Amino acid sequence: MKHFITKRSESSGVSRRDFVRVSLVLGGGLMVSVYGCGPNGEEPMVNATTADGALAPNAFVRIDTSGNVVITSKHLEMGQGSYTGLATIVADELDADWSKVTVEGAGADDKKYGNASIGGLQGTGGSSAIANSWTQHRKAGATARAMLLAAAADMWKLPVSELSTEPGAVVHKATNRRATYGTLVTAAAALKVPADVPLKDPKDFRYIGKDKKTTPRVDAVAKSNGTATFTQDVKLPGMLTALVAHPPLYGARVKSFDATAAKAIPGVVDVVQIPTGVAVLAQHFWAAKLGRDALQVVWDETGANTLGTTEIMAQFRAAAQKPGMGIRNDGNAETALASAATRLEATYEFPYLAHASMEPLNCVVDLKKDSAAIWNGNQFPTTDRAAVAKIFGFPAEQVTLNTVFAGGSFGRRANPKSDYVVEAATIAKAIAGRAPVKLVWTREDDTAAGYFRPAFLHRLQGGLDATGAPVAWWQRVVGQSILEGTMFASPDGKDSSSYEGASDHPYEMPHVFVDVHNEKVNVPVQWWRSVGHTHTAFAVEMFVDEMAKAAGKDPLEFRRSMLGKDPRRLAVLNLAAEKAGWGSSLPAGRARGIAVHKSFDTYVAEVAEVSLENGVPRVHKVTCAVDCGIVVNPDVVTAQMEGAIAYGLSAALFGKIDIDQGRVVSTNFDRYRVLRQREMPVVEVHIMPSTVAPTGVGEPGTPPIGPAVANALLALTGKPTRTLPFV
Amino acid sequence: MASITINGTAREVAADPSTPLLWVLRDVVGLTGTKFGCGIAQCGACTVHLDGQPVRSCATPLSAVGTKKVTTVEGLSPDSTHALQQAWVEGQVPQCGYCQSGQLMSAAALLDRNANPSDADIDAAMQGNICRCGTYQRIRTAIHRAAEMKRATA
């Protein structure tokens, strides 16, 4: 997501004009907020403190008189470990006692929680949570620590220079004195806030870069005993559950409906028309479900999409024969191709993919006379809030946003139109706020609503000289723009999320040409874990192997010969190859494939070891090397690589949304197959040591796995994979 | 009104007999650890035990429960100390966490009948539980680890 917005450097958000305030909250807590300026450079907001001091969401750090440290996370926890990562950064500089650290989700406020990686908008995406918070959160922790040190120095009448900290306490080693943070917060809060606190020397990091025993996930216990709260679990007094009958086609609308049978179902309370369909409200889910089943709706399908995936791909194939919008043009690829000793051509086709998070989409809205509250796993809190406020006719400030855990998302909960959140709000409005409403989508609702990873087609041509060296690369990318029609659209119509990872591919050769078509199709599309890289990495890395094969060269050596100016990419490639034993013998019927890709500023190489079982690829082992800069939580990085590989492998093996005459066919897991336990390969992750600032890990593990498997199949069978999924 | 035993406690529940046990647990009894994922017994997020056997509660009507004892993730242990829960935390298994109640219940039923499951046993027992975060490798490791812990204390 970060490529399409003018990128602000991570430090520019906070470093020069940091604004630090502190308040003594009632009950005696020290609250430190480190603010950057707003996206337009406006002054930071004044710190607001709640009456009891127990909840003060405009702060990253809060320490109470018992020494409990509460970190407010501006980023959604949807599995990627953001809560743990952000807490690790703060806790390290604070020298907090990890066992006393908890994390809570932030409310909506761009000024306080804006993400410099996405233009100052508060949001979780683009694998940016750690990257955009690194310096900001270190300062937040270090500032609190400096004040606690100063308070202890005052109390003991000692110079600060003689004091140090250990987890949760200030100590004076010479006299063996120790004061826990909880006992110091009241005095510390009365002190002047230091303007520019020194940060730790990385060699002194206590938590950053340490193992899972030192900084276990803050949510691991709650997620192992059923107590973690997701939107699905929110229950308010008098709350009704709403299910919505949605149109069967994209663009269809309600013509008429008969709610008689639905209202006869015990537990059904109301049936209301909303802009996106007809909502059935009931005392609990099952009554709402039966009520919706009984509902009779006549749809107006005028102007709705009636194309299926077969017709859409045929449209893309036709477009691939015509020039698109030019993106990159080094040298003269067409001329070079014409004179190349060897010329190759390949077309790769990628289907629509559903995010298919385990928690189907849902949202709780409580509408009152002059205010409203939302409970949701928010990826775009401020845009969601603004969309809801608009529906209610309130200023945004009158809408409170409560962020809870998301049961996955993979990008889906970051909807630029706030689709399901808006739907929940329109239901609350339709019943005039008579009761809080929990909108629940069934699995079928969730999948059929679309906002898929768009289908794409890549047409490639390559040229080799007489020695087998690559001389020309020609690539045409055809598919739907994700950004078109959203707040992120580029005025020139070029959507980098369609060709990121292709137009900037790293392989050195004199002639490179890339163009793109934005195809108009009335199927809603959206970013899906690693966005354009989901298909560009496959097209590029598969075609490189096809070129290597034509050149008679080893795929690893062929890549190395073109990556001399890209040392970080080359290093992960070499590391993965070495750890996988590239070139060593394998049991009969097995082969290795390799792929390397950079996305979201993180480099990942993967080697897949593959065989065929009854004609179906079986991935036995994946060796992964990742360079994501400084590593905050090595085990979280490892987990994200494992998970991203599983997610990408699931898509490559099985992922495909079929649409037939406009109707989505693959709406549940019986028809939208996903990876299961038996198909999970052994994944081995190797993390490159680094001293550069951290970059993201949520997405970058996904792109290389598809092509790594395809390249293994190419080695095994001699046949390239031109259409996904494999199965 | 039906009487069912959930986590050792007899409960009177006011729900139509055709209501899936999942929604009785979540919406009537208020035990939300058991999750809704697909509604058609395909994903396993709703897995609970009936007399120790793993079932998909989204496709089990209340009428089918009868006198069978229902165990949910909340009943796995009173204090999160079931060997699997310890192994889940030690192995840092959960990511988003939404599927993990179901994973734990399927794994618990496996360990109850097989003290030393092989990888193939785990594959077979866990094949009905989807995890979109891809924690499968850690689930496998944690099941082996929990089996080891249970054997050590047996």
Image (tube, helix red, strand yellow):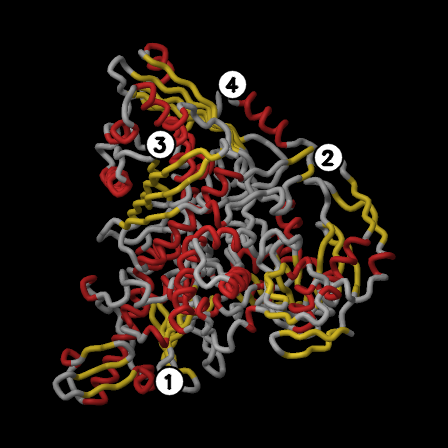
Give the residue displayed 65% in from the left and 36% down from the top: A659
Counting from the top left corner in percent of width and height, residue A200 is at 21, 66
Foreground mark, 3 or 1, reads: 3
Question: What residue type is disc 1 on?
Answer: Ser
Q: In this view of the protein, which residue sits in the foreground, B129 or A154?
A: B129
Residue at the spot of label 2: A303
Q: Is residue A299 left or right of residue A514?
A: right
For marks 3 and 2, the one nearer the N-term is 2
Whether pointer 3 and pointer 1 mark residues with C-beta atoms closer than 8 Å, the reply is no
Q: Chain of mark 2?
A: A
Q: Residue A321, which numbered label?
A: 4
Foreground mark, 3 or 2, reads: 3
SS state under label 4: loop
Is disc 1 surrounded by few (<14), some (14 to 19) or many (20+) residues within 10 Å? Answer: some
Is disc 4 surrounded by few (<14), some (14 to 19) or many (20+) residues within 10 Å? Answer: few
**A661 vs B104: above or below:** above
Q: Residue A66, which numbered label?
A: 1
